[in-house]
Amino acid sequence: MPDKLSVAEARRAEAVGRDVVLQGWVRTRRDSKAGFSFIELNDGSSFGNIQVVAGAELEDYEAVVKRLSAGCSVSVEGLVKESPGKGQATEIQATRVVLHGTADVETYPLQKKRHSFEFLRTIAHLRPRTNTFGAIARVRNCVCNSIHGLFQEEGFLYVHTPVITASDCEGAGEMFQVTTLPLDNTPKQGPQVDFTQDFFDRPAFLTVSGQLEAETFACGLGKAYTFGPTFRAENSNTARHLAEFWMIEPEMAFCDLAGNMDLAERLLKRICGDVLTKCPEDMEFFNLRIDKTVIETLQQIVDVEFIRLPYTEAVEILKGCSEKFEFAVEWGVDLQSEHERYLTEKHFASPVIVYDYPRTIKPFYMRLNDDDRTVCAMDVLVPRVGEIVGGSQREERLDVLELRMCDQDLNPEDYWWYLDLRRFGTVPHAGFGLGLERVIQFITGMSNIRDVIPFPRTPGNAEF
Ligand code: ATP
Ligand code: MN
């Protein structure tokens, strides 16, 4: 009986001599004049295909092999042999080829020629079959595995925070409302919609962040993280924003800003290091076809110690440099992507963690510093993407937190449960948010965030 192998396994030299069955999709078929055919087969297990040599002596050579075209699904039985060809260790000498599904040459959209990413977005259900999207899917999988790996090894608890929430947590972004009220006949109380008749007896939304809920676990169980979908109804249509994206949010009790920076740096080093060792073929492809600097940049993340720079000094550097920015830099104003990129790409040529931001531009839950003007916030900046991580030490003092809420026109009563964490056994604690798709963009060099998530949700787009 032949062994069922993946293409990745069959491509290794150790597989030579084995009788195997491979199952996948045909990328191309070429016929030699000598009366046999070469089939390039891919099953998603690796970037590279395996070459199948199918001779005319095969039963069904005319009926099956000669009908194969890009996109056909097949099972191939045969012997793994050392390949005489360059760039491949092995090939398959087929003894049997079974066709499962044809793909009409006239109508199957993924024929040989390269398609634009824009076009591929219109066939998101077929793009996993392309080189680029296969590579992205494997890198994304590797990154998720590294994230869980690091947190689990370090004793973090994986918690599932709710997707539906009643608190407009932190004003992190525009929210999607969740309701079962009839839109054409909403119950009213005076001129206002009567949400006491809605499903949750109050307005409810899709979450913009799991942080506040993650804090409840950290402030009781020590170290926790969430890793789940997050929603922002921002009508921004940029290459860096999605309406639905995945966020990783660790939260640590008895931790300050320095400890928080250490974790962010360890996490990014782990993610990048793992991708370099576990997805070398995919990374070579990105480096060759998408961005000639991606491997070098990942290696740098792994090798160098991140620069740590107070916001005030960052502003001085930006004001003093000769670069022409679209937006002016002023103390008290948030850094724009162009400023972040200047710092990390040009001035330092290194990943940079900017910390101690003005209190006026950061949310209420960030810990107020003794200077009364800045908060214990930190953003990690990397080349090409700019901000990839945003985090802070949290305000653990009840009175200060209440004042900060009032400052920002929030009603402390709406956050009674969040304030309880400070009322009972409060501890210094810290955490951050890492956007998964921004990480994948950074690693792969893909310029549009819509191409690093399987089914992008953006204004006007939710077909697949
Ligand atoms: P930006 O200024 O880029 O909109 P933000 O300040 O709103 O980001 P946070 O609220 O701090 O971001 O969210 C934490 C992380 O989530 C960000 O560092 C980023 O990696 C990611 N992120 C935020 N908004 C989006 C979005 N719309 N699509 C994809 N990722 C996002
Ligand atoms: Mn935003």
Image (spheres, grey):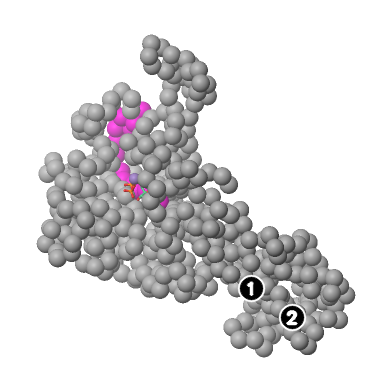
Q: Give the amino acid at mark 2.
A: Asp
Q: Which residue is mark 1?
A: 49
Determine if the C-beta at disc 1 is less than 8 A from ligand 1: no
For the record, the magenta segment spans 417-435
For residue 34, side relative to residue 310 (left or right): right
The answer to whether residue 422 is magenta is yes
| Percent coordinates x, y for residue 167 in the rendering | 38, 30
Q: Which of these two is toward me, 263 or 448?
A: 448
| Rendering coords of residue 122 (x, y %) | 55, 53
Q: Where 425 falls versus 388 (above or below)?
A: above
Q: Whereabouts is ligand 2, in terms of quadrant?
A: top left
Whether residue 402 is in magenta: the answer is no
Please tell me whether residue 269 is drawn above or below residue 400 in the rendered image.
below
Q: Identify the element where label 1 is drawn.
A: loop
Residue that numbered label 2 is attached to: 31
Is residue 154 in view from this perspective?
no
Quadrant in which the N terminus is drawn? bottom right
Instruction: Tell me which numbered mark, 1 or 2, is placed earlier along the sequence.
Output: 2
Q: Could you say where residue 9 lies in the image, as x and y percent from the top left?
A: 66, 72
Residue 69 place in picture, x, y as percent: 72, 69
Residue neighbourhood size for the residue with mark 2, other residues' Cα within 10 Å, grouped as few (<14), some (14–19), many (≥20): some
Q: Tell me the residue at 48%/59% (across/down).
A: 143
Question: Is any atom of residue 187 visible in this view?
Answer: yes
